[in-house]
Image: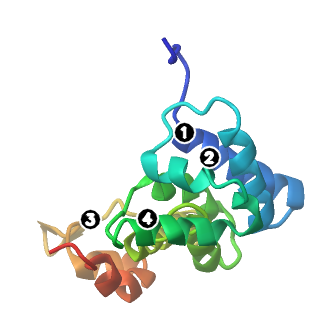
Amino acid sequence: KRWKIGDWTDDTDMMLCIANAIIKDKDIKLSTIAQNFKEWFNGEPLGIGNNTFKVLSFKDYTDNPQKGAEIIWNLSSKKSAANGAVMRTSVVGLWNNDTERYATEICKLTHYDPRCVGSCAIISLLINNLVYKNQMLSNLTKNGVDASDTEEFWNSKCPVADNYGELLKYNTR
């Protein structure tokens, strides 16, 4: 049995790879994050997703990690939109400098699909807005009606969502 009480998934491990790289470099350097991902992959990763496994399997992954992610995405006929990156890049929302750019670049280390990239940017920016701009999501009503599922509501909470709206609809029909 691989899983023990208290174990966590690959998403947490990879989020820690990102956090440890930021702590080490006191900055966000994609090369350090990619090295951390590859070192983790060479260990005994629990629960690793198919997309991430394929990308990190490239022997020369750390030389050009985003290229590996792009190759895997192209091999899927540009249909692979796994969700692992959105779970691990949430930590980027705690970095209060160029959050959108870093979230998108870190996402592309393993997930190249524009839906993945847009989702990572949106979640990281939402977290950043909650932490640094004191934006609260507790008032989810508009004129007494639940507005949390409306595009207008979320665009007001995170303006970047509007930028990614069409991107997130990509290939979903």
Determine crowd level at label 4: few under 14, some 14-19, many 20+ residues with C-alpha closer than 10 A. few
Residue type highlighted by circle 3: Leu
Q: In the rendering, which numbered label is found on residue 136?
A: 4
Which dot, 1 or 3, sits closer to the camera? 1
Residue 10 percent location from the top left of the image: 54, 39
SS state under label 3? loop
Q: Does the residue at mark 1 contact the one at mark 2 (Cβ under 8 Å)? A: yes
**Nearer-N-terminus badge (1/3):** 1
**Nearer-N-terminus badge (1/4):** 1
SS state under label 2? helix
Q: Judge left or right: residue 69 versus residue 79.
A: right
Determine crowd level at label 1: few under 14, some 14-19, many 20+ residues with C-alpha closer than 10 A. many
Q: Does the residue at mark 4 contact the one at mark 2 (Cβ under 8 Å)? A: no
Give the answer, above or below, for where 163 lies relative to 62. Answer: below
Which residue is tagged 2? Answer: 14
Q: Quadrant of the C terminus?
A: bottom left
Determine crowd level at label 3: few under 14, some 14-19, many 20+ residues with C-alpha closer than 10 A. some
Between the residue at mark 1 and the residue at mark 2, the CA separation in whole angstroms equals 6 Å
Residue 49 percent location from the top left of the image: 45, 44
The colour style of the image is: rainbow
Residue drawn 43% across and 72% down?
74
Q: In the rendering, which numbered label is found on residue 140?
A: 3
Q: Nearer the viewer, residue 67 or 92?
A: 67
Q: Judge left or right: residue 128 versus residue 31.
A: left
Residue drawn 52% across and 69% down?
71
